Structures are given as structure tokens and as C-alpha cells.
Amino acid sequence: MRIDAHHHVWTLSEHPQTWMTPDQAETIGRDFSLADWSEAATPSGLTHSVIVQTVEDANETLELLTLARQSPAALGVVGWVKAGPDDPGQQLARILDHPGSEKLVSVRDLTEYRSDPEWLAGDEAGRLFKAAGNAGLAVDLLIRPEHQAAAARAVAKTPETRFIVNHLGKPDMDHTGAADWGESMAAISGSPNAAIKLSGMATLARDFKTVRGRLPEYVDECLRLFGPDRMMFGSDWPVSLTGASYADLVTAVTAPLESLSAAEQESVWAGTACHWYGLELPKEIK
């Protein structure tokens, strides 16, 4: 079994993707559905997924929960809760009253767009992270290298909450080798309540050939820092289409994992996501 632990869907007329650049829009500036994801993913053996939010809109999370409730392929949803002076626990309670709330597995702040690199270590973020943990949810960290130090402190001081770093923390693979990346990521990996996604990789360099060439070393560093039981695959589709096809991305990730045991490979492709997100598998798979 293979699970895509990170992909998106959107309808532009309902939720404009304001983060999208004109260059990105040339490739992904259209609607993408769960059926579109399945058509792209199934030939590569990925049959189930976790849908991740894209915009700062509470209604999007509710709509994704409804979608996931109606689809056996969608095992979970990573939603969004506004961080600020209001109690995030009350916001989560409203989401958890929604039909399909059993599919909510995590919340995510779009930290990469915040100007303050220290925000993750502050009080607003801390309240959100504790509320998520109290609700039995994980926290997805969408960060860039400048946020890593604050992220490491936030993870360490909230041990009751599970944290999952998205997109390897967004290193610039054009200029950053795996050893330097590993050195900067060590503080986060040192906390046992932190995991990492092999996701977003198609767009971590200007040319996917660079990503493909450096990926084996990055995977080795991931294994050294986190181990297979704290690593999971995510495509970041359809954003990934701006760098590579779904099949090419899966092939690039598969190759450096082939030296692992069957059990370790199963962890990266499915087991870690199931454990860290608490995914409920369909009865025919159990």
C-alpha cells in the first residue's frame, strides 16, 4: 500500500489560490479534483491520500472534510485554523462538530509567508500547537530555512503534540547540499515528536534534474536524522506539476529507498503516515 500524505485539490472560482505566481498559473492555473489526483497517482501505486489545505479560509477546511467523507481514497485532511488572540481551541471545536470531522488529522499554518522568522516560537503559535495536541491532532509545519530555529524550539517545548515538517523544510537544492541541510535540520529531528515529509521536492530546484541528482543524498540524511518511522511520502500535487510529472516524482523517490528493508519501505510509503496522522484504513486493507 502507498499513501500520498500531501496533495491538494481546489476550485478556483470558490477558493482563488492567491499564492500562485503567473509562471505557476501557466501549468496549474485551473481546477483540480480528487478524481484528477487519482488518475495521476493510481498508475504509480498510490491509492489513498491526505488532502492538505492551501488557503487561509476556514470554509475550505470544512469543504475538504465533506469531500473526504464522501471518498474512500481520502484518509485524512490537514486543515487550517486562524492563529491569533482568539482561542484556537474554540475554532477547532467548531470544526470538530462538522460532519466528516473524523477525517481531520492535522492543522497547518502557512508560516512560509510570515515575515517574522521567530513567530513559531511565540505565544500565538504556542496556543495553536497546544490546542491541536489537546484535540489529538498533529501540526504540519510549512517552513523555510529561516524558520527552522524557531520551529525547533516550538517542537521541543510542545512534546505532547506531533509535528510534521512539510517539503523537507524547503531547502534550495540548487545551492544547498544534503550535508548542510542535515546540519540545519538536526535540531528539529532531535525531538522525537517531529517527523518529516518527502514532499514538495519537484519544485526545490529550478530544474528537476538537479532534484533527481541530489535526492539520494537527501534521503540518506533523512534516514540518518529521522529514520523510516518518522518519514512519509507526499507528492504536493498539483503544485509538483510545475517541476515534474507525478510518475517521474514517484520514480525519483523510489530509487533511493530500494536499499531499505521491505518493512522500512512500507513505513515511508504508508506506515508513518498512518501512525502520525492516526489514519483509519478501509476495512478491505486492514
Image: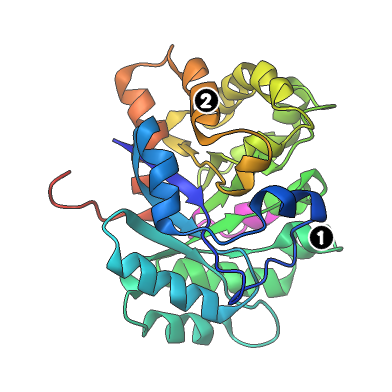
Q: In which quarter of the image is the N terminus?
A: top left
Farthest residue, direction top:
259
Percent coordinates x, y for residue 186 in the rendering: 67, 34
Residue 236 in view here: yes
The mark that comes first in sequence, 2 or 1, is 1
Percent coordinates x, y for residue 162 in the rendering: 49, 54
CB atoms of marks 2 and 1 within 8 Å: no
225 or 13, which lies in front?
A: 13
45 or 176, which lies in front?
A: 45
230 or 34, which lies in front?
A: 34
89 or 175, which lies in front?
A: 175
Is residue 56 positioned above or below 154 on the image?
A: below
Q: Is the magenta stretch mostly helix, strand or loop?
A: loop
Q: Which amino acid does label 1 sit on?
A: Glu
Percent coordinates x, y for residue 192 in the rendering: 51, 43
Q: Is residue 123 magenta?
A: no
x 69%, y 19%: residue: 214
Q: Considering the numbered disc 2 on the image, is that residue within a helix, a strand or a loop?
A: helix
Q: Is residue 202 left or right of residue 257?
A: right
Percent coordinates x, y for residue 63 in the rendering: 45, 75
Which residue range is magenta in the image? Answer: 153-162
Q: Considering the numbered disc 1 on the image, is that residue within a helix, a strand or a loop?
A: loop
Is residue 134 positioned above or below 283 on the image?
A: below
Residue 111, image quadrant: bottom right
Please give the residue where the numbered disc 1 appears in the rendered image: 118
Q: What residue type is labelled 2?
A: Val
Cα distance between the residues tagged 2 and 1? 32 Å
Please give the residue where the numbered disc 2 appears in the rendered image: 253
Residue 188 in view here: no
Figure label count: 2
Of marks 2 and 1, the one in the foreground: 2
Instruction: Tell me, for residue 136, which label it has, or none.
Output: none
